Amino acid sequence: QVHLVESGGGLVQAGASLRLSCAASERTFSSYPMGWFRQAPGKEREFVATINWSGRITGYPDSVKGRFTISRDNAKNTVYLQMNNLKPEDTAVYYCAAGRLHGSTSAFANEYDYWGQGTQVTVSS
């Protein structure tokens, strides 16, 4: 069982930056691919970023590519999402997720087994 806790959300103006963190309880954290997803009111959960166990492989949708960066520190059991040049359409609850043990990166929510409680990001125009 992997317990995930997100932090770092908040209210910012358009163009600002935020860094989200997700701390994992599992000592084998480095064996899991990780991902970030977001969900805005009335919308489906949306893929934001994914990273493999070593951090060498990452993936993003076009909507955030070039603005968001996912990274991880396996020594600290933590994955990060650096968000730059935020836009009002980035407003959502952001969730981190752990994929299948020894699995690969994925953009699909159903390939992640463990989820955090979410952190709110609000971007004002």
Image (cartoon, helix red, strand yellow):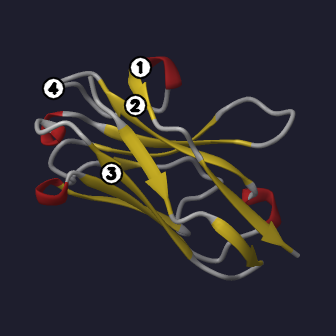
Identify the mark nearer the N-term, 1 or 2: 2
Tags 3 and 2 touching, CB below 8 Å: no
Instruction: Name the residue tied to disc 3.
Output: 23
The answer to which image quadrant residue 124 occupies is bottom right
Residue 112, horizontal then vertical, whole percent = 40, 24
Residue 28, horizontal then vertical, whole percent = 11, 35
Q: Please tell me which residue is depicted at 74% across the width and 29% down the height of the picture.
A: 44
State how far apart marks 3 and 2 are (Cα).
20 Å
Task: Using the image as rendered, state which of residue 48 and residue 40 is in the foreground.
Answer: 40
State how far apart marks 4 and 1 are (Cα).
12 Å
Mark 1 crowd level (few <14, some 14–19, many ≥20, 10 Å Cα)? some
State how far apart marks 2 and 4 are (Cα).
12 Å
Which is more foreground, mark 4 or mark 3? 3
Identify the mark nearer the N-term, 4 or 3: 3
Task: Using the image as rendered, state which of residue 21 and residue 53 is in the foreground.
Answer: 21
Residue 90, horizontal then vertical, whole percent = 72, 58
Tags 2 and 4 touching, CB below 8 Å: no
**What is the secondary structure assignment of the residue under circle 4?**
loop
State how far apart marks 1 and 2 are (Cα).
7 Å
Instruction: Name the residue tied to disc 4.
Output: 102
- Name the mark on residue 63: none
Identify the mark nearer the N-term, 1 or 3: 3
Instruction: Name the residue tied to disc 1.
Output: 111
Tags 1 and 2 touching, CB below 8 Å: yes
Instruction: Name the residue tied to disc 2.
Output: 106
Which is more foreground, mark 1 or mark 2? 1
Tags 4 and 3 touching, CB below 8 Å: no
